[in-house]
Amino acid sequence: MTQNATTPSPDMLYLSSRPALPVLAEVAVSFAVLVTNWTVRQRTRQALRQLPPELLKDVGLTREEARHQGTLPFWRP
């Protein structure tokens, strides 16, 4: 049997029928996601600062733009 866009999969039905997480668990998950995003952002900006000029040209950035983006604090999008 094939699934179409309007028929939810059995996995989705299971997930939607589960009770919501307790508030403390939701806060913990939200905090973990936030810290993960900050870490990825920090690593990405550090890598951007270290890119050679030819790769910066490939992504359409100047050295000054890369330096500016690379110096932004991790909490700023």
Image (cartoon, rainbow, N blue to C red):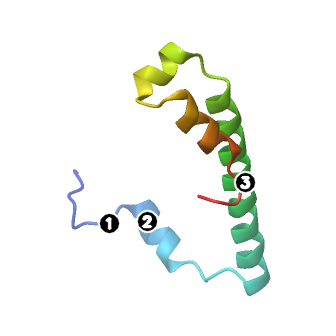
**Mark 1 vs 3: CB contact within 8 A:** no
Q: Position of residue 47 (x, y in %)?
A: 66, 30
| Residue labelled with disc 2 | 12
Mark 1 is on which residue type? Pro
Placement of 68 over or under 32, stated as above or below: above
Q: CA distance from mark 1 to mark 3?
A: 41 Å
| Residue labelled with disc 3 | 73
Label 1 vs 3, first from the N-terminus: 1
Q: Position of residue 28 (x, y in %)?
A: 78, 71
**Mark 2 vs 1: CB contact within 8 A:** yes
**Among all residues in the image, which is located at the extreme front?**
64
Residue at horizontal 70%, vertical 60%? 75
Mark 3 is on which residue type? Pro
Image quadrant containing the C terminus: bottom right
Residue at horizontal 54%, vertical 17%? 53
| Residue labelled with disc 1 | 8
How packed mark 3 is, by other alpha carbons closer than 10 Å (few <14, some 14-19, many 20 or more), is few
Question: In the rendered view, does 52 fall on the left or right side of 43?
Answer: left
SS under mark 3? loop
How packed mark 2 is, by other alpha carbons closer than 10 Å (few <14, some 14-19, many 20 or more), is few
Placement of 57 over or under 48, stated as above or below: above
Residue at horizontal 75%, vertical 68%? 31
Residue at horizontal 61%, vertical 83%? 19
Instruction: Work out whether residue 58 or residue 63 is closer to the camera in this orientation and state it.
Output: 63
Instruction: Work out whether residue 41 or residue 76 is closer to the camera in this orientation and state it.
Output: 76
Mark 2 is on which residue type? Met
